[in-house]
Amino acid sequence: MTNLPDSSPVPTDAAPALLEVRDLRYRYPGAPVDALAGLDLSVGQGEFVAVVGANGSGKSTLARLLGGLEKASAAALAMACGHDLLTQDGRMAARRDVGVLFQNPENQLVAECVEDDVAFGLENLAWPPEAMLARVDEMLLRFGLTDLRRREPHLLSGGQKQRTALAGVLAVPRRVLVLDEPTAMLDPAGRVEVLAAVRELRAEGLAILYVTQEMDEVVGADRVVALEAGAVVYEGDVAGLFRDGRLVRRLGLGLPAAGELALELAARGRGVTPLPLTVDELLEALRGTT
């Protein structure tokens, strides 16, 4: 299985949070209960935060609110890159600084060819033509799309579509990237492509909020936040979450592949501790039991 990297720039205590919400609430029209029910969260400069939870826990709703795409029903505080998400002007400004990538890339591909898709946001912001062309070339090269620049999006593979969507999101310079299950609709090859792109972005210090139901993609995050019924039920290091077997089962999360294999081995009388989360950790633990 492909994991996210296990290191990234660590934000300083003095650096202000780029994303910060307190008592964030959201209820869909006609719904009997809140989709987000008093949620607190902050993400600092260069931090990689994974968000997990069962379907309906509020993950995608949170992603949309943080990207300024929806208005909260209520909040004590809702800020993104210094913009007040409780105001229309603040949400519009936040959309410039916070890029959001959804699980279905076809929902974000709107042009007739790859390079036009990448240029779409820049055109809307009225970038000068020369600067726009240079930025598009930069993004095409960065995401391995140069040879596909004139390709129609519907002819791309799943991984190529998602990389095109990601290039379009990041063509506009961002301070935060919110990824909402970006590999959910991809085959293994496409998933590898997208995770490789995310690794590069993380290494450059971009603040990332990564929503996923793939537990292998959680490994290596600076912090993991688990949601249940729109509220945070765990926030802390990744190993701490997976050590809490009762909570993991309650949330229906499962374990990273290495952890699942370790449990299978334990059932056969070859247990290892602490619970390994990566293949390397599992192999090292097994060497220690021989």
Image (tube, rainbow, N blue to C red):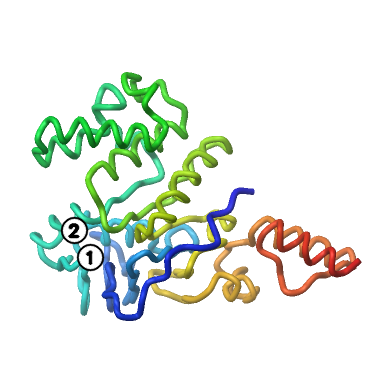
Q: CA distance from mark 1 to mark 2?
A: 6 Å
Q: Is residue 76 left or right of residue 151?
A: left
Say which residue label 1 marks. 80
User: In the structure shown, which secondary structural element does the residue marked by tag 1 occupy?
Assistant: strand
Q: Tell me if residue 46 comes above or below residue 177 in the rendering.
A: below
Image quadrant containing the C terminus: bottom right
Q: Give the x, y percent position of residue 81.
A: 21, 65
Asked whether, in this view, residue 95 is left or right of residue 232, the answer is left
Q: Residue 153 sits in which quadrant?
A: top left
Label located before the other in sequence (1 or 2): 1
Give neighbour class at mark 2: few <14, some 14-19, many 20+ (Cα, 10 Å): many
1 and 2 marks in contact (CB < 8 Å):
yes
Residue 182, image x, y percentages: 43, 46
* Quadrant of the rendered image containing residue 264: bottom right
SS at circle 2: helix
Q: Residue at x 13, y 57 (%)?
A: 93
Considering depth in this image, is 120 or 12 the residue closer to the camera? 12
Question: Residue at the location (10% across, 65% down)?
Answer: 87
Read off the residue under disc 2: 94
Quadrant housing residue 37 = bottom left
Number of residue marks = 2
Classify residue 127 as left or right of residue 49: left
Residue type beneath disc 2: Ala
**In this picture, is 187 found above or below 52?**
above
Question: What residue is at 42 percent from the left and 65 percent from the top?
Answer: 9
Q: Which one is nearer the viewer's eye here, 171 or 210?
A: 171
Instruction: Name the residue type under label 1.
Output: Ala
Q: Position of residue 142 (x, y in %)?
A: 38, 37
